[in-house]
Amino acid sequence: MTITAGAPLAEAPAAQAARTPWARKALPWALTAVLLAGAWVVNAVALPDSASEAPFVSAATVGGTATAGNLTAKVIGVHAARSINDPSGWTAEGTWLVVELDAEAVDSQYGSMLSVAELTIGDRTFRATERGQTMFRTGALVPGVMRHGALAFELPEDALKGTAALRLANASTVADNGVIELPIDLGGIPIEDDITLPETGWAG
Amino acid sequence: MMTIPTPLRPIAHAESTPPPRRDGWWRTNRLALVALLVLVPLVGVGVWWNEWYSYYGYGARKVTAVQVPKDGTIELGGATWGPLKSGEAKDTSGLDMPAGTRLLIASVPVKPDGTAVTCDSPLLVQQSTGREWAPLRSEVGIPFSSDEPERCVNDLADPANPASVKPYSMVVGFVVPDDVDGPFWLDVDPTGDGRFVRFSLNP
Amino acid sequence: MLILMTAAPPSPVQERTLLTRVRRMASLIPTPWLITAGGAILLAATAGFGGLADAAVAPVPTVTVGEQYSGSDLTLTVQSVELRTDRGNALVFPKEEKGEKVLAITLEATNTFHAPRSASAAEAVAGIRVKGIQGEPTISRVDGGGGAVLQPDVPAQLVLAWIVRSDELHDGDAVELTLPDSTHFVGTNVLKGQDYWSDIVVGATLTATVTEIPPQGDGSTS
C-alpha cells in the first residue's frame, strides 16, 4: 500500500499559513529581538577580564586613617624637595616626593611589610625608592601599634605637576588584595631645598 | 448440520490487558541522575582537596595544632618543646616601647633529638580573634644576643658530629596593645609537615 | 518512491551510487590546473621576496663615549671607562695581593618605559658586556646609595664594575663593549599581564680607551 503524496498534503501548509494568527507568526521574531537586546546589554555591562584580580581600593585623605587588607595607614604629610638625606648621612639630589606616614598591620604581623608603595602620575608608575632609610619594604608592621616613617619617590624633573595617585598595600602584589589609595595634588606642594627623612620608629 | 464453530481461543478483549504504560522521565533517566548525584559531590571534593593540598599540603604552613598540656612538654618534628615560661615585662623603662602597649616575653626550651630542627620564630596568637604578633627585638631596643635565639638554631656540641645539637631556649618578646586581652596561644612551627606546637599563654 | 534514511549502513546498491557520485564530482575539479597555479604563486612570491639567498644582515651600529644609545627601553650614555685599584662605591672586592684591579664603567641610564625596572635584569644595564672579560657587571650607584631600580624617565648615574687581573688590561688599551637591545612583551600565559623583555641581541658596540687611575695615597677614594 503506497501513501500517495498528493494534492491534499501539499495544500495543507499554505492553507495553514493563511489561517495562523499574525501574532503567532511574529513570535519568533519578537523573541529574537529580545534575546539580541539582552545580549547587547550583557556585553555592555560586562567587566574586563582583569576585573577578577582587581584590588579592593580604600580611599584615603591626608591626615585620615584608612584600612585596606592587612594595612591601616595614616598619611601625615606630603612634601617635595630637590635633595633628600637620611640619618645615616646618605644624600641624593633630584626631584623627590617624600610621604610621611604612620602604618600598622590589622590581623597578622607574619610577613607584614609596606611592600607596595606606588605613585601613578599620568601614564607612568613610580615605586618608592629602596635607597636610604625609609619604611619601604623595611621593618615589620605590628597589628594595633602604629609605626612612623617615610617613603621617598624619585621623579623626573618636570613631574611635579597635575595629580598623582599614591597606592599603599601590605601584600606582595596589588592583585586580589586591599590597597589604600590617596590622591595628591602635585602642583600644590611647595618644593623645598632639602628634606631629612625621619627615622622609622614608633608613632606618637 | 453446520453450527458456528466455537472459537479455539477466547477472544482477547482490548480492555482486559491495559496498554503498556510508557516510562516516565525520572525512570528513563535514572542512571544519569544517580551518576550526577555521585559525581557532582565527588568533583567538588576533588577540586577542593587539590587546591587545599597545593596550599597547605607541603608542610610550609601551620595546619594542625598539637596542644601542649599546661607546663608540660611535647615531642614533635624531632625535638622536645616546653615547658613554656612566659610573663609580662614589668620594667620597660630602658626600652623604646610605644605608648599603650605591653611587652610579653616567652621562653621556649627546645631539646632536639639529635639532628638540627629548623623552625620560624614563634607567633603569639590571640585566641578570640586569631590576630598574630611576631617577635620584636631591635625595634624596642633589645640588642641581639646569641644566648637568646628567636628561632631554632643548631649549635653542635661536637663540631664533627651533626647529631649532637645542644638544647637551648628561644627567648622572644612581643609588643601587644593594652586593649588586646588574652588568653593567647604561642605557636611554634617546625619545618617538616603541617603540624605545629601550640602552647597556651595567659599573662 | 520514498527513500528511507536510516542509521543502518547503506546497502551495496546505494554505496556504489554514493562513491560514483563522489568520483564524478572529484573529476570535475581541475586538479592539474590548481597545482600549476599554486606552484606559480609560490615561485612568484619567493622571487618577490628576494629568492632563496640569505637576507643581508644589517651591520651593528657603533656608539662612542658620551653618545646616547637607545635600546631595551633604556637610554644609555657611557661617560668613562677606568681601570683602578680602589673600588670606590662599586660592590666588588679586588684582592690586592693577587694584583686584581677594577674595570669601572660610569654611565647614565634612563628607563624610558612607563614603570620601574631593575637595572640588573639581563636585558637592561646588566646586559652590557666587555669583549674578553667574562661575566656580567656588578652594578652600583655612583653616590653609593645602593638600589638598582630605575624609575621611569629618571636618569641614574651607575658604575659597572668587573674584577680584572693586572695582566689583562693596561692603561691605554682599547676595550669593546656590547650594549643590549631587546623586545618588550606583555605575558599572556604564565606571566599574564606582566611586562618582560626577550630576544636579547647586541644593539650597539662601543670602543673606548681605558684610563688607569693610579692608586691614591692611603685613605682617599677616587
Image: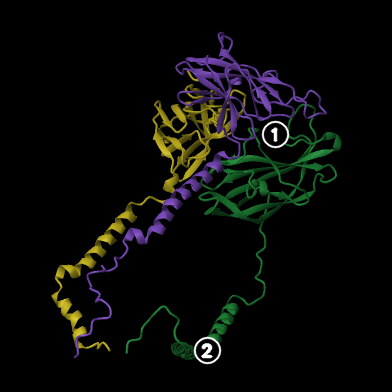
Chain colours: A yellow, B purple, C green
Q: Is residue C176 left or right of residue C50?
A: right
The type of residue carrying mark 2 is Trp
Q: Position of residue B139 (x, y in %)?
A: 58, 20
Q: Does mark 2 fall on the same chain as mark 1?
A: yes
Q: Quadrant of residue B86?
A: top right
Q: Nearer the viewer, residue A27 or C109?
A: A27
Q: Is residue C122 above or below residue A33?
A: above
Q: Position of residue C219 (x, y in %)?
A: 77, 26
Could you tell whether C211 is left or right of B42 in the image? Answer: right
Q: Which residue is mark 2?
A: C33
At label 1, the amino acid type is Asn
Q: Position of residue B158 (x, y in %)?
A: 81, 24
- Which residue: 66% across, 55% down? C204
Q: Where residue B169 appears, x then y in whole percent?
A: 67, 19
| Distance in Å between CA atoms under marks 1 and 2 | 75 Å
Residue toward you, B201 or C114: B201
Q: Chain of mark 2?
A: C
- Residue A132 shows in this picture: no
Image height check: is B87 above or below B190? above
Quarter holding the N terminus of chain B? bottom left
Q: Furthest residue to the front?
A: B1
Figure check: C87 above or below C76? above
Rendered image: mark on residue C89? 1
Mark 2 element type: helix
Q: Residues within 10 Å of mark 1 (few under 14, many from 20)?
A: some
Nearer the observer, disc 1 or disc 2? 2
Q: Report helix, strand or loop for mark 1.
A: loop
Q: Give yes or no for contact between labels 1 and 2 (Cβ–Cβ under 8 Å).
A: no
| Numbered marks: total | 2
Q: Nearer the viewer, residue A26 or C169?
A: A26
